[in-house]
Amino acid sequence: MEIPFFRLEFENPKWTICAQDTTAEHSMKQILALSDAGRFLHSMNFRISLLVSAFTLIVAIPIAFYAALQLERISITAARDMQYELTRALVKDVAQPVQLGFSGTVDERLNYVIERAGENFQYARITKSNGVIMSEQGSAIATDQLTALEQQVAESLTPYTSEDGFQLIYPILSKKGKLRGTLVMVWDPAATYAALRKSLWHEAEAGAVLLLIASTICFLILRRVLSRPLRELGTSVNLITAGQYDRKLSTSERRDELGEIARRIEGLQITLAEGRAATNARIQDQHAQTRAVDQLRQGLAALARRDLAYRMNEPLPGSYEALREDFNSALDGLSNTMGQVLGSASDILGRSSDIRQGSGDLSGRIHSQSDALGDVAQSMGALTQSVQNAAEGARTVNAIVGQAVDEAQNNAAVVEHAVSAMQQIEASASKIATIIATIDDIAFQTTLLALNAGVEAARAGESGAGFAVVASEVRNLALRTSQAATEINTLITDATSHIENGVNEVHNTGDVLQHIITRMSEISNRVSASAEGFVSDSQELQALSGRVDELGTLSSANDQIVERNTQSVDLLRDEAAHLDTLAGAFTLPRTQQTSPSAAAA
């Protein structure tokens, strides 16, 4: 930003100042000085150093105070002891001069003691027993009190000492113990106290200097031992906040709490780096899962439209590629199965039409046979009533029976073809049942896949909610496919049952026709014999007429059986057409969309 006096260029973590004039530079220096002073006063080094100094003062001040008191007591005691010694020595030294009246000697010896006492001396007076003052030195004080005390000491011959110990009055005695005079000594401890205070003040100044030096050394040591590692830790935390997790901390090699914190920060960096890598991997996996779910959704939508030609052609990343391959493989199997179902349904429809046509032809022939047998019965009645025309009637009957035998043989061939067609239909129905079982198995496998997908989606939590919906739709589609396969299997089972009944009836029809052929052969033989001697065999002709009536009844029954077979074949054809419609609803790949003939082949 630009201001009139100076410009600040921000560079993390410092500012570069470009001064534009002397006043701006001076102002900026003051600001930075204040800022540095503020940071210094708020720094941990200064606070710890200040705290150490405070604790040192808290401990040192009482100790120093106690030491000063002890020093004062010792100094005063020493001063008192010296005063006592000087006073007692002076009393001994001036005893003889006082007795002899040598005032000069008394002054000399008193001055010697005063010189030794120094500044502690205040007042001294030597008085003879008769009250004459031989020597007096020092500043004047209240002498009345001293005079009274001096009189008491002279009377009692006992030294006097004041309460503070600085006023001494001693009697001057001869060797024999007679009073020669008195000595008054007054000491002033002010000089001792002044010297003591001066000494203590110098010691306090030296202690303050030592404390300042110790605090400075403590600050420098803390700056090296604590401040720099803390700044390094702070820089590392800032880098971690900025997303950089690769900074190596030299403080981690320390074995103290800061080293432990540095190692914890490095561990945090490793954890955050691993977390970021895991997050990136999870994001990539989510992208891959989204792609897989999108393609699977499109595939399931195609399945919902019954489009079996759809394939997941775009490769999927990672483990989802196996899902794509399994899905395409499942669609390949399902489309192949549905192609076979479609071909089998078309084949069944064609063969049922052939059976329907053959059954119609068989019904017409049996009806014709029934009419022929009626004619035979009428002829046999006429032959019975008119024996004269027996030979002619026998020949006519022989011709008619021969024709009936030929027709019966032809009908037998038709029945064999019908039986063969029924067996082929039965075989096709068995294949369809197998195919339906395959479809049901595929639906069951698809249901299991959908359940597994639902479980995996539930494990994935909210990110797998969409995949759970897709798995549910796949499971519903598999259930619908299984239900349709069950319905188709039921229809095939019913059709197979009807086909088996039709085959049995056709077999019975074949047996009856064979029996008819045999009987017709016998009739032909007997009619030939009757041509030579029918008159004698009239009773046998009556029996033959009854058998012909029975044959007519059997032909009518065979006609009814063929009509029922025709109805069963019609029902089979309708069911085959319905199966073809169901299978045709699925869209198959072009390579599997074959014609019914090709499917049958």
Image: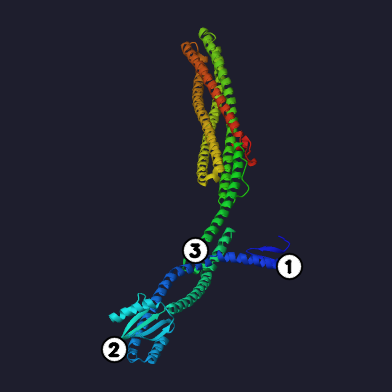
Q: Is residue 438 above or below residue 395?
A: below
Amino acid type of the residue that numbered disc 3 sits on in the rendered structure? Ile
Check the picture and name the quadrant holding the N terminus.
bottom right
Query: Which residue occupies 65% across, 66% down?
Result: 30
Q: On the picture, is 134 further left or further right than 535? A: left
Image position, residue 116 (x, y; %): 41, 86
> Mark 2 falls on what kind of element?
loop
> Mark 1 falls on what kind of element?
loop
Residue 233, by quadrant, is bottom right
Q: Which is in the foreground here, disc 1 or disc 2?
A: 2
Image position, residue 496 (x, y; %): 51, 30
Single out the residue that lies furthest toward the top. 385
Q: Which is in the foreground here, disc 2 or disc 3?
A: 2
Q: Earlier in the sequence, mark 2 or mark 3?
A: 2
Amino acid type of the residue that numbered disc 2 sits on in the rendered structure? Ser
> Mark 3 falls on what kind of element?
helix
Label 1 belongs to which residue? Answer: 21
Q: CA distance from mark 1 to mark 2?
A: 96 Å
Q: Which is in the foreground here, disc 1 or disc 3?
A: 1
Q: Earlier in the sequence, mark 1 or mark 2?
A: 1
Label 2 belongs to which residue? Answer: 174
Q: Are dots 1 and 2 in contact, CB under 8 Å? A: no
Q: CA distance from mark 2 to mark 3?
A: 88 Å
Q: Earlier in the sequence, mark 1 or mark 3?
A: 1
Local packing at callout 3 (Cα closer than 10 Å; few below 14, some 14-19, many 20+) is some
Label 3 belongs to which residue? Answer: 261
Amino acid type of the residue that numbered disc 1 sits on in the rendered structure? Asp
